[in-house]
Image: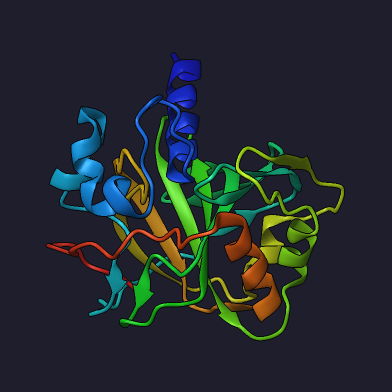
């Protein structure tokens, strides 16, 4: 039973990053007839993209003050490979890294990227956003998100991009030792909200932890990512509805 739950979680997390596993032959994209405005009509499996009320991404604003506990980061393992699945570039991590929050442990599966950012902070869009996707043993998903602004080059991104898979379906083994912490700011203060996967099937019930501090990448690093994807890969912000964003 646990194996079945975990398999479902992993499939959902991979869908989060753009790999249409459970949806098989259903083609979706970020533009045209398969674009975000039509996701909910492409398949019954994608209906939540249209009917959901806690969809991601959002514009984080109207913050509510709360006593948020520190996230317990235990990122000891490194990325094993990097893949271009046609919707994003994704670094997969070896087992053994995790976060602890809400009295639960969530294992790190992968980190992937969107340009421009999917979420906005106080109506500000960033050049790129990273999502580190985690799964608990009982099927819950949690995302640690980080914004990238233009400035000094990121050493962590440089190590990943050195093996940039430039074509859809390309997968390269990573020789550099890159930990997820290499992609994050020093401060781990965060905003919290409830949301969904940002790609079909747009499943809700995802814990979102948006780090307050951004990190920098160079213009060249951003251009390399955009060149591999060939088009923006961000879902537009969704209605916040009755949700609150806690800081």
Left or right, 118 with respect to 61, comes to: right
Which residue in the rendered view is the most extreme toward the right?
Answer: 175
Residue at position x 41%, y 50% from top? Answer: 102
Relative image position of residue 118 (x, y in whole percent): 39, 65
Residue at position x 31%, y 52% from top? Answer: 32
Residue at position x 81%, y 46% from top? Answer: 174
Towards the viewer: 167 or 221: 167
Up-down: is 113 above or below 52? below
Towards the viewer: 111 or 115: 115
Residue 47 appears in view:
no
Q: How is the image coloured?
A: rainbow
Relative image position of residue 247 (x, y in whole percent): 35, 74
Which residue in the rendered view is the most extreme toward the top?
Answer: 1
Relative image position of residue 87 (x, y in whole percent): 49, 48
Q: How many marks?
A: 0
Residue 155 appears in view:
yes
Relative image position of residue 49 (x, y in whole percent): 23, 45
Which residue in the rendered view is the most extreme toward the bottom?
Answer: 151
Left or right, 230 with respect to 80, comes to: left
Residue at position x 17%, y 46% from top? Answer: 50
Towards the viewer: 225 or 80: 225
């Amino acid at each position: 039973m646990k194996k079945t739950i975990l398999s479902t979680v992993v499939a959902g997390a991979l869908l989060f990053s753009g790999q249409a596993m459970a949806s098989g032959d259903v083609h979706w994209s970020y533009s045209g007839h398969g674009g975000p405005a039509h996701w909910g009509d492409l398949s019954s499996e994608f209906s939540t993209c249209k009917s959901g009320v806690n969809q991601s991404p959002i514009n984080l604003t109207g913050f509510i003050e709360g006593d948020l506990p520190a996230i317990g980061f235990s990122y000891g393992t490194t990325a094993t490979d990097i893949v271009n699945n046609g919707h994003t570039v994704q670094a997969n991590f070896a087992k053994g890294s995790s976060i602890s929050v809400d009295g639960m442990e969530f294992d790190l599966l992968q980190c992937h990227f969107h340009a421009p950012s999917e979420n906005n902070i106080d109506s500000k869009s960033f050049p790129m956003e990273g999502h580190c996707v985690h799964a608990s043993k009982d099927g819950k998903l949690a995302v640690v998100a980080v914004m990238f602004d233009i400035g000094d080059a990121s050493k962590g991104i440089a190590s990943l991009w050195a093996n940039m898979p430039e074509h859809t379906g390309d997968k390269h083994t990573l020789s550099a030792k890159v930990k997820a912490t290499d992609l994050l700011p020093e401060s781990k203060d965060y905003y919290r909200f409830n949301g969904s996967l940002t790609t079909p099937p747009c499943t809700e019930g995802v814990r979102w932890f948006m780090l307050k501090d951004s990190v920098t990448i160079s213009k060249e690093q951003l251009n390399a990512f955009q060149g591999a994807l060939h088009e923006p890969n961000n879902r537009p912000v969704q209605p916040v509805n009755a949700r609150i964003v806690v800081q």
